[in-house]
Every structure is written in C-alpha cells, then in structure tokens.
C-alpha cells in the first residue's frame, strides 16, 4: 500500500523509495518451534487449571456433606426446618379444596342428622319404654328439629302410656320452646293429661315459659270433676302467677 | 481470533503463521535487534492468549495485534532504558542470503546501513509511524486506529518524520 498522498521533495521522495526497498530479515525457524512449545504449555496449564478447579469444587462438596459431630445442633435444626416445611406444604390445601371439603362435611352431617331423626322416630314407636326414653333423649342431640319431630314428640307427650316417657318428653319439649308449634302443643296438652304428676309438671313448665295463653286452659282444667286437690291448688297458684 | 477467544486455542497456530513475520518486522525495525524481536514476538503471542477475552471483534485483528505489540515494546524499552535502538545490520545479510551479485549486495548493504542509522536516530514517535506506514504497509487510517488518533494527524506526522529523516540522512552522508 502506497500511503504517500502529499508532496515530498526530490530527496524525500528518494528516501521514501529507499525505505520501501530495505530488506527485513526473516525470523529464525526456531521461533516457530518456540511458539508451538509455548502454546502447548499454555494449553496444558489451562487444562490442569480446569481440572484443579473441578477437583476443588468436588472436595468442598465432599467436605460439606461429611458428618461433623460439632454441628449436631445445626443438623437437628435443618431436619426440623425440613420437617416443618414438608408438613406445611403437604397440609396446605387450595381454597377450592377447602370449599369442597366443607361441602362434603356439611352433606355428611346433614345425612347423619337425617339418620338420627329417622332412628328417633322409629324408636319412639318401640314397645319398650326404655327405648322410647332413649329416643326422646336423642332429640337433644339434633341441631335442628323439623315439624315431623315436633309432631312425634307432642304425640308421645299426649298419648304415651308410660308416665316417665311423657315427663322426659315434656323436658325435651321445654328445650324446644322457642318453636311456636311446641308452645301451642304444650298449652293444648294441658287438657289431655290425666296424670296429676304431668299436670303439675305442665303447670311448672307454663310458669317457666311464662305462657299466658295457658290460663284459659288451666281454668278449663279446674272445672274438671276428678281433679286432684293438690293439683287444683297448684293450678290456682299458677293462674295467679301468670295473670 | 474469535475462535481463539472461545478457547479454541489450536486456531492460534493459524494466526501465528499468518502474522508472525509482519510482527517480527515491526519489532525488528523498532528495536534493531533480531534476537530480541523474536523474543518479543513470543511475548506478543503469549499476551494474545492471555488477554484473548479482551478482543471484542469490533475492530480489525491487526489493529489489536499492533496495540499489544506497542505495549510489549514500551515494556521492553522501560525495562532496558539504556537500550533505545541498536542496529544489528549483520543479521540482515546473514538471514537473507539470496542476493544477485557481490557489488549489488555491497551497495545495498551500505544504503541500508545508512538509512537504518538515520532511522535509528529518529525520535521513537516518528520512527513508529514510518515503520507502520512504509514497512508494515498499514494505511493512514489503520495507523490512526492503532495509535488512537486521527488520520490527518498521522499524515502530518509521516510528513514531518520524512523531513527529519532526510536531515539526519544528509548529515550522516556528508560526514562520511
């Protein structure tokens, strides 16, 4: 490449030409040998460095996983943390799963309620008084009672042959007094009871529930001929209390 | 060079074969010492290996190579401050033996000697641009890239270098 693009004088021009003709010696053949030897050495060094660094990493890993008695606490903590994490993540459920689980539980509990109700109703028809007593006591385990149960209990209250069963039924119905149908049934039951014990118990119940509608029924009861005297005085007191 | 950068070091042999002569010439004309220049060539290639990751591939490989070579030269001159430029004329005739005739050889040898001596007396700054321009046959733009300056600046430097070379050469011829 001829670089000169400006004016030289004659001497400068000659010198420029002469410079171009100056011979440059060639490097000796030994220089090539030296270069390849240097390249080989460099490559070998690089390889051994790579191996060394790999070995160093391997050694460190080995050391890290070697058991050291001094680190017992650390191992214990790590295991504890791992256990905690596994427990946390395996026990964790999504919102959808929770909702589905809740629905299943609700469905199951309503099914159980239905079963209990059915069992109670069938037990109320059992000829044995003990079984009927058990059936009445089951009503306390029912979270919700429907009209069918109330009707069954009121029937038992009015018509069961066994006095104890009727008394227990009365107790059970008092617990369900928030239900208007129960209150109405209890008031109507006053005239249906022949037993003095039941009449007194109902009188107490009416006072307890402050059921003023019962006064009319009690007055009707007082007109009955075969009324026990002690019952009569009890009813009179009850009428006084309620009116 | 990009293969070398990617740790494909066998390709370095290819670069050596292609460039070691021009590199040697540059170093030889800068130091005037063949044996030392050979050592410096080795150093430049060693640095190419060592600093291969610094080659970005944006510029030319030659520019990067001269950049490394200049650094190696500077280091050499710093370490050997007394050694500036010593003409080792014998090496030319010893190494290049195929000359046509004895007279012609003698005449050429004398011319070369005088010119080399004049070159040796030039300031390193001027000597460098003449070497890169005339011996290495780099364009002004390439020289400007190596020296990180403008092309115009290089033109001015070459012009001034030639004027100074002429003065030195004429002075030495008149004293002979």
Image (cartoon, coloured by chain):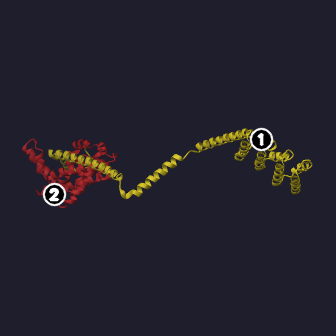
Chain colours: A yellow, B red
Percent across and percent down for residue B170 are 16, 55
Instruction: State left or right for residue A87 relative to residue A164.
Output: left
Residue A8 visible? The answer is: no
Q: Residue at x 39, y 57 (%)?
A: A72
Name the element at disc 1.
helix
Spatial CA distance of label 1 from label 2 is 142 Å
Disc 2 residue crowd, few under 14, some 14–19, many 20+, Cα 10 Å: few
Give the labeled residue for mark 1: A152
Considering every residue shown, the one lying at the far bottom of the view is B82
Q: Which mark is residue A126?
A: none
Percent across and percent down for residue A121 are 73, 39
Name the element at disc 2.
helix
Nearer to the camera, A219 or A232: A232
Disc 1 residue crowd, few under 14, some 14–19, many 20+, Cα 10 Å: some
Instruction: Please state, as top left, top right, bottom left or bottom right, where the N terminus of chain B lies in the image.
Output: top left
Residue A114 visible? The answer is: yes
* Chain letter belonging to callout 1: A
Nearer to the camera, B2 or A138: A138
Figure check: A123 above or below B29: above
Q: Which mark is residue B171?
A: 2
Percent across and percent down for residue B161 are 24, 54
Percent across and percent down for residue A83 are 47, 50
Q: Residue at x 18, y 51 (%)?
A: B39
Q: Are marks 1 and 2 in contact (CB under 8 Å)?
A: no
Q: Mark 1 or mark 2, which is nearer to you?
A: 1
Instruction: Please state, as top left, top right, bottom left or bottom right, where the C terminus of chain B lies in the image.
Output: bottom left
Nearer to the camera, A232 or A12: A232
* Chain letter belonging to callout 2: B
């Amino acid at each position: 490449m001829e670089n000169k693009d400006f004016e030289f004088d004659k001497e400068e021009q000659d010198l420029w030409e002469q410079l171009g003709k100056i011979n440059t010696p060639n490097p000796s053949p030994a220089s090539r040998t030296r270069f390849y030897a240097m390249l080989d050495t460099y490559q070998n060094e690089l390889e051994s460095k790579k191996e060394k660094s790999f070995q160093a990493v391997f050694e460190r890993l080995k050391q890290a996983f070697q058991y050291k008695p001094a680190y017992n606490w650390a191992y214990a903590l790590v295991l504890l943390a791992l256990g905690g994490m596994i427990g946390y993540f395996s026990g964790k459920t999504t919102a959808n799963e929770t909702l589905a689980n809740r629905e299943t539980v609700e469905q199951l509990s309503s099914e159980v309620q239905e079963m209990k109700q059915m069992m109670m109703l069938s037990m109320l028809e059992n000829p044995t008084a003990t079984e009927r007593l058990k059936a009445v006591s089951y009503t306390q385990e029912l979270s919700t009672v429907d009209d069918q149960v109330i009707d069954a209990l009121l029937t038992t209250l009015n018509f069961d042959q066994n006095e104890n069963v009727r008394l227990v039924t009365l107790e059970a119905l008092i617990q369900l007094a928030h239900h208007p149908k129960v209150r109405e049934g209890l008031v109507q039951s006053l005239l249906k009871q022949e037993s003095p014990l039941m009449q007194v118990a109902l009188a107490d119940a009416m006072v307890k529930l402050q059921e003023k509608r019962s006064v009319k029924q009690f007055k009707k009861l007082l007109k009955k001929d075969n009324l026990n005297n002690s019952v009569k005085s009890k009813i009179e007191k009850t009428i006084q209390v309620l009116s | 060079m990009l293969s070398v950068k990617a740790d494909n070091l066998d390709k370095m042999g290819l670069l050596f074969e292609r460039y070691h002569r021009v590199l040697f010439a540059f170093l030889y004309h800068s130091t005037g010492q063949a044996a030392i220049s050979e050592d410096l060539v080795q150093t430049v290639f060693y640095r190419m290996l060592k600093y291969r990751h610094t080659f970005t591939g944006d510029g030319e490989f030659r520019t990067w190579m001269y950049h490394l070579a200049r650094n190696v030269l500077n280091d050499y001159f710093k370490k050997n401050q007394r050694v500036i430029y010593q003409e080792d004329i014998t090496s030319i005739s010893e190494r290049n033996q195929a000359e046509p005739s004895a007279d012609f050889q003698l005449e050429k040898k004398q011319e070369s000697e005088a010119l080399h001596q004049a070159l040796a007396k030039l300031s390193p700054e001027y000597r460098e641009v003449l070497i890169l321009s005339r011996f290495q046959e780099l364009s002004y733009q390439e020289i400007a890239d190596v020296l990180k300056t403008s092309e115009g600046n290089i033109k001015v430097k070459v012009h001034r270098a030639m004027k100074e070379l002429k003065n030195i050469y004429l002075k030495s011829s008149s004293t002979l």
